[in-house]
Image (cartoon, rainbow, N blue to C red):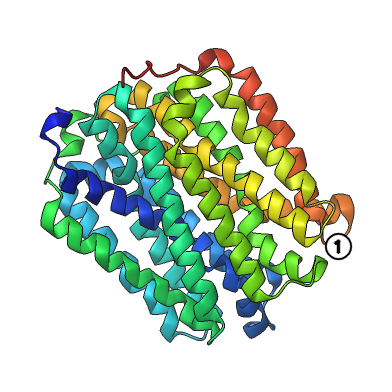
Amino acid sequence: MSNNKHVSKQVTATILSMSLLTVMAGAAIAPALGIIKAHFAHAPALLVQFIVSMPALLIIVTNLFFLPISRRLRTRAIATTGLVLYVAAGAGCFFVDDIWLLLALRALLGVSVGLIMPLSTGLLAYYFPPEEQARLMGLSAAMNQMGGVVATLLAGLLATVEWNYAFLVYLLGLIALTMVWLWLPDEQLGSANKRGVPFEPRQLLKFHPSVVGMLLLMMIFFVYPTNFAITASRQAALSTHAITIIMVGLDVVAFFAGLVFGQLMHRFRLAMKYMAPLFFLAGYALFLAPSALMLCLGSALIGVANGVGVPYLNTIASIKGGRNSATTVMPLLSAALYAGQFVSPIVVTPLGRQLFGAADSAAPYKVAVILCLLFLLQVWATRHFQSLPPKSTN
């Protein structure tokens, strides 16, 4: 089933429905982080931040073993296993009141997303030709952000009832699970790759511009969900409702950026690689003069950066990886994406305190500005290694 003419709209919608869920692994409960922190006041602040970033660690491990998993299980079995675990581990946090048990369930949620994520982008490269992948990767990123909009809004509202109600947003996985049962074809993706090792260093060497770029992009972006709810209430005295609206607004902006990504790639092919680091830089710079207006504008710019940055790196990698992308480069990109999420608080929080002092509430954003400059340098240094996709004739 390699010709996109044979791919039904239901199959495409099913693949995109999985993209809707992946962002929810961490960022969905970010608006509730302030309330969760208050509930677990006895726990270290970094441990509370791990509630958002813990799934990333297990996503990374699962991604690195995705190739042997795909050789033993077909796509429908992988997707079903991932989605059942997603709902059980995600919504299961509603029933626990111990932070260590909560972190354990968040780790299991990471395993589930590690199974879903490579399929949500790799199947687009499997079914569709290169000239259509920029549009579809943008649409996938848009669906990812739409999931963030719905989940962030629901989690923020539910958290005002009680902190643990925020985790009920993971019941949305039941929708994608139903679609998988009804429409997802049962492909054997791993059979195309004869090597049985979980990770091939030569793949990292081949795709290093996209992989390193994704790592830096997510380290920068995740400064936002792990800090914004806490710092916005302190810096600008914003309520939980206002914080939720701003964070939802970021996802809305990123959603529309993903929708128009295909057209942007067609018109600004050479400049697109610089768009994410520059918009991130401008967004976090605005946070250094905190006010409600600056926080809103900065959030919008960060939304644009994330909305175009992720599909750009996915598109470049999928063109290079071809139809085997789901078992080669996409697991690497997914691992890099969540590695960035996981290490972001570990790097940013201590570095901010070391460089700017523990009393500086804007310290994480100052570190983000430094990382943006590093990202910009990485993009410039690897520009000759990045291949642009062919222009669409549409």
Q: Quadrant of residue 106?
A: bottom left
- Extreme residue toward the top, this view: 384
Q: Is residue 278 above or below residue 293?
A: above
The residue shown at (25%, 42%) is 68
Q: Nearer the viewer, residue 201 or 262?
A: 262
Which of the two residues, 39 or 140, is positioned nearer the viewer here?
Answer: 140
* Residue marked by disc 1: 358
Q: Position of residue 270 (x, y in %)?
A: 55, 17
Decide if residue 258 is on the left or right side of residue 1. right
Residue 227, percent from left and from top: 69, 61
| Residue 25 seen from this side | no
Residue 194 percent coordinates (x, y): 20, 29
Residue at (66% x, 52% y) in the render? 299
Q: Position of residue 367 (x, y in %)?
A: 77, 46
- Examine the image and state in which quarter residue 191 appears: top left
Q: Quadrant of residue 87?
A: bottom left
Q: How many discs appear? A: 1
Image point 61% across, 72% down: which residue?
33
Which residue is rendered at x = 53% and y = 25% of the image? 209
Q: Is residue 290 visible?
A: yes
Which secondary structure lies at badge 1? loop
